[in-house]
Image (cartoon, rainbow, N blue to C red):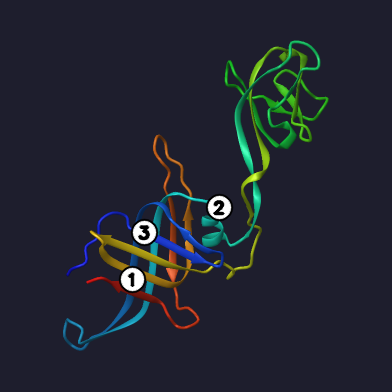
Amino acid sequence: MATRSFGSGLLIATGSNGPVQFGTLQDVTLDFSSSIKTQYGQGQFPVAAGRGEIKASGKAKVGEVRGAFYNDLFFGSASATGTVKLAYNESGSVPGATTYTIVVTNGANFVADQGIIYTATGLPLEQVAAGSEATGKYSVDATTGTYTFDSTDASAKVKISYTYSDATAGTTQALGNPLQGVQPTFSIIVSRSYNGVGERFKLHSCISSKLSVPTKMADFAITELDFECFADAAGETVTNYTDE
């Protein structure tokens, strides 16, 4: 019987830390291309052709990712438990009397200031050194997440953005500046089918050539990973399994 395919199929990549399933897979494309050299005589058409290098590459688009996706398939950096989160436009009100300070909700785990705007106008305030506060200017104590304002901003409503740490959730990957030629290697299984009949491609050894992390207005963002295949230690490149 002939092999048909319907839907986005399945894609699993296996690196040094085990399998990584591509969640909410949108589509996968495998491309096999080669260079061709032709020999001509006195006629217009070639009399011989030879195939040179073959390139096996692909790209996959996914609708959800986890920390292992980035680390095991592209960056290959050290990974640790814990993350840094962003509190965006947290509402606050400058006290009407001294000390004119606001301690943000996650002040105990404060990492860095990311700016303040006036709620009423959307205009930004300026961060300055402690003791230099003035109208529209504030200082911040990064050890406690305490923001100090000038008395002329008493009772002003503001929106504060900042980052803070969470030691128990997520992962953190510090990329650093690794040497060229150092990257994670993984194998890939691509499966496509129709009514339970289909085919599988195994690419024995791959590295990723591109990682796209987009955002999109009023729509789900789709992450894209491009990869290329090369021979593994046993000389294996691509294996195709069919049910026909």
Quadrant of the image containing the C terminus: bottom left
Label 3 and label 2: CA atoms lie apart by 20 Å
Q: What amino acid type should be assigned to the residue bearing mark 2?
A: Gly
Answer left or right for 233 relative to 244: right
Q: Point out which mark residue 165 bears.
A: none
Label 2 near label 3: C-beta < 8 Å? no
Left or right for 98, reference 204: right
Is residue 55 or residue 146 the one in the foreground? 146
First in sequence: mark 3 vs mark 2: 3
Name the residue: 77% across, 17% down. 100
Residue 94 in the image: x percent, y percent?
71, 17
Give the residue pinned by disc 1: 32
Secondary structure type for disc 3: strand
Provide the residue designation for mark 3. 10
Q: Secondary structure at mark 2?
A: helix
Locate residue 142, reporting x and y percent. Answer: 76, 35
Q: Residues within 10 Å of mark 3 (few under 14, many from 20)?
A: some
